[in-house]
Structure formats: structure tokens, C-alpha cells
Amino acid sequence: MPLEPSNQTPVQTEAAQQLAAQPALKALPEGGARVLSGRGEIYSFSTMYNVPRGFEEQRPYTIAIIRLDDGPMVTAQLTDVDAADVRIGLRVEMVTRKLREDGDEGQIIYGYKFRPLLPTASRA
């Protein structure tokens, strides 16, 4: 699987901010990009109490490593769930959420987060 440089690294912790200066890599299957389902399960997680500047209003929040059903693992903030209810193996799905406001005009920055998979009649 070839590796392609990416500059879209989510920065969630001070350690991640230090690593952000290094180019990240994302794996692409032979033949290019593929669409992922956006569903998976929690592989590991941590609740953040000491947060980077700009995330103080969200404190505390939980981040997780998600093993997607399609194979890759991603790191993301969890939403719509109490920290006490998070557990390894919890089924989750990707959603678009507000990450923060930026600048004097308060530009809203959106990105992906994960929430517990919602039960619906159409899903098996």
C-alpha cells in the first residue's frame, strides 16, 4: 500500500502538536483513495482534562482510537456520549461537528468526531 504525504493531521494534545511539524502519512490502497464507511469500534480512549489552548471550553473531552470496519484506525474526539459510558469495543459512527471558532470574526471550524452508533430500523 503506497503512502502519501498529508498535512491534515488532527491536533488534540500537546504531544500531537509537537509531532504536527512532521509530515503525516496516510495509506492509500493500490489504485488510489477509497470511500470508508465511517463506522467502527473504540480500540483505545482517554479523557482529556489538561487541554491545548483553544480547547478549554470543551474540557473535559474524550479522544479515542477508532478501528474502522474498513480496516484503518483513526484518532478522533468523541461526542454525544458521557465519558463514563465510553468503553473499548463500543460501536461508533463518524459525524460532522463544530471543532472550534477561529479569529476575531469567530469563523466556525468543522471537522469529524465520532459518536455511539445510533440504533435505527434500517440497520441490521
Image: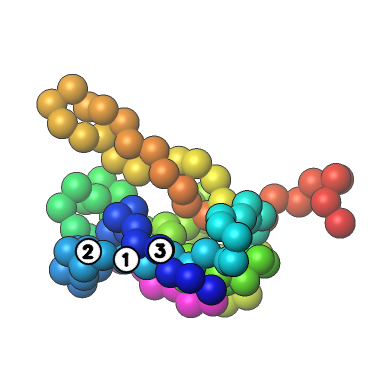
Q: Residue at x 39, y 72 (%)?
A: 46
Q: Residue at x 22, y 27 (%)?
A: 106
Q: What type is the residue that disc 1 sits on?
A: Ala
Q: Of 69 and 81, which appears nearest the observer?
A: 69
Q: Which region shows up in magenta? A: 43-48
Q: Dots 1 and 3: beta carbons under 8 Å?
A: no
Q: Residue at x 43, y 69 (%)?
A: 3
Q: Nearer the viewer, mark 3 or mark 2?
A: 3
Q: Position of residue 68 (x, y in %)?
A: 61, 66
Determine which residue is flagged by label 2: 20
Measured Cα–Cα span from mark 1 to mark 3: 9 Å
Q: Residue at x 50, y 41 (%)?
A: 96
Q: What type is the residue that disc 3 sits on?
A: Glu
Residue 45 part of the magenta-drawn span: yes
Magenta-colored segment: predominant secondary structure: strand
Q: Position of residue 19 (x, y in %)?
A: 21, 70
Q: Residues within 10 Å of mark 3 (few under 14, many from 20)?
A: few
Q: Is residue 10 visible?
A: no
Q: Which mark is residue 4?
A: 3
Check disc 3 and report its element: helix, strand or loop: strand
On screen, residue 37 versus residue 111, left or right, reads right
Check disc 2 and report its element: helix, strand or loop: loop
Q: Dots 1 and 2: beta carbons under 8 Å?
A: yes
Q: Which mark is residue 24?
A: 1
Q: Nearer the viewer, mark 1 or mark 2?
A: 1
User: Considering the image in quadrants, where does the C terminus appear?
Assistant: bottom right
Q: Earlier in the sequence, mark 1 or mark 3?
A: 3
Q: Position of residue 93 (x, y in %)?
A: 61, 54
